[in-house]
Amino acid sequence: MDRNNGAGRITGTDMEKWAKQYLEFCRYRRELNKHTLKAYRIDLRQYLSFVRDDAFVKAKIEEYITELHRRYKQKTVKRKIASVKAFYKYLEEEELIDGPNPFGRIRVKFKEKETLPRIIPRNEIERLLNFMYQQMGRSSEVGDLFRDLSVVELFFATGARVYEVSNLKKQDVDLNGGVIRIMGKGGRERYVQIGNPDVLKLLKKYYKSNQAEIDKSGCFFVNRRGTRFTEQSIRNMIKKYVRMAGISIHITPHMFRHSVATYLLEEGVDVMYIQKILGHSSIKTTQIYLHIASKKQMEILRERHPRNKMRIQCVA
């Protein structure tokens, strides 16, 4: 076999064929969720389109990485490079390439600016929920309102991701025990208890008013056509009620997740319990909320510390 940079004469067509095999491997053997697979597919397509027949030419790969840094933020660059590195690792393990892995000779350093998660102020969550309940009390047709309010309450009750809520199945929701089975990233499942009786009562009312459609589709949250209430529909729904409630800040479904984690920390809940509730695979992911909760700690110490009430004559 003729050698090209120690890897053999491997063409862009070869790489595209192997990329397809790799994605199948990720789907059926690693059981990655559709969102991760979509990201891998986009990243690999972008990479292979750039390098073409030079997938083992170090200079071409370096050029691609430079282009990524030029076009994207550090977090996106890191993910795209990780996608490609994982693909080359697969090629190595499957012995599809003969020669060194070019990514083994490439070093990429990142100086990421730490971005703290954006949370929703407590008073704005309260304002949104109160508005939606008031709308439900005034409306004669409460079908969509039951569903919309149930979705928002579930976000705040569980800290679930938008695709996790959208993809809930009928059998995932135990309305008697108040337990929600959530399928998270990488097919990891977790169980979250609905702790508030009013939220559970609302979910029961929603199910009762939509039982026929839910039983038929198998999806717990359904639209007017009786099919799954999609992620984009959920985002649009929240945007609509935020606007109607006169709330000026931009609110997304994922901000409820950040808010749940932060406010539980402020209430003294151990970070390990929050990790389990949110379904984080690593405690490091959860610990970022400690930085946000520390703001509340500063507020408490500034306003409520007993030192503030002591009569001490300071010389300095």
Image (cartoon, rainbow, N blue to C red):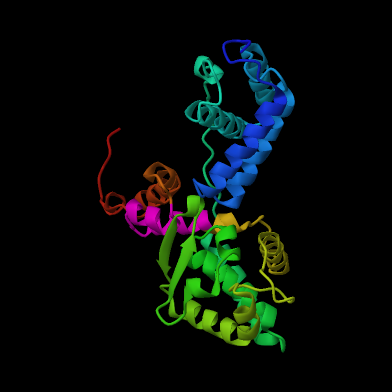
Residue 192 lies in quadrant: bottom left
Q: Nearer the viewer, residue 241 or 222?
A: 222
**Up/down of 223 relative to 74, above or below:** below
Residue furthest front in the image? 1
Q: Camera-side residue: 44 or 244?
A: 44
Q: Main secondary structure of the magenta part?
A: helix
- Residue drawn at x 60%, y 10% is 5
Q: Say above or below: 115 vs 209.
A: above
Indicate the position of residue 109 as horizontal and vertical percent values.
52, 21
Q: Is residue 192 visible?
A: yes
Residue 130: x and y in percent read: 59, 75
Quadrant of the frame with the C terminus: top left
Instruction: Judge by depth and name the residue closer to the eye, 270 or 51.
Output: 51
Locate residue 68: give its quadrant. top right
Point out residue 280 in the picture as x, y percentages from the top left corner.
43, 50
Whether residue 71 appears in this view of the structure is no
Q: Residue at x 40, y 41 (%)?
A: 284
Q: Report the number of numbered marks.
A: 0
Residue 271 within the segment the image draws in magenta = yes
First to last magenta residue range:
257-279
Residue under the point 35% across and 49% down = 301
- Residue 152 % position (x, y): 58, 68
Residue positioned 49% across, 56% down in the render: 184
The image quarter containing residue 23 is top right
Classify 251 as above or below 141. above
Q: Is residue 44 magenta?
A: no
Looking at the rendered image, the quarter that the N terminus falls into is top right
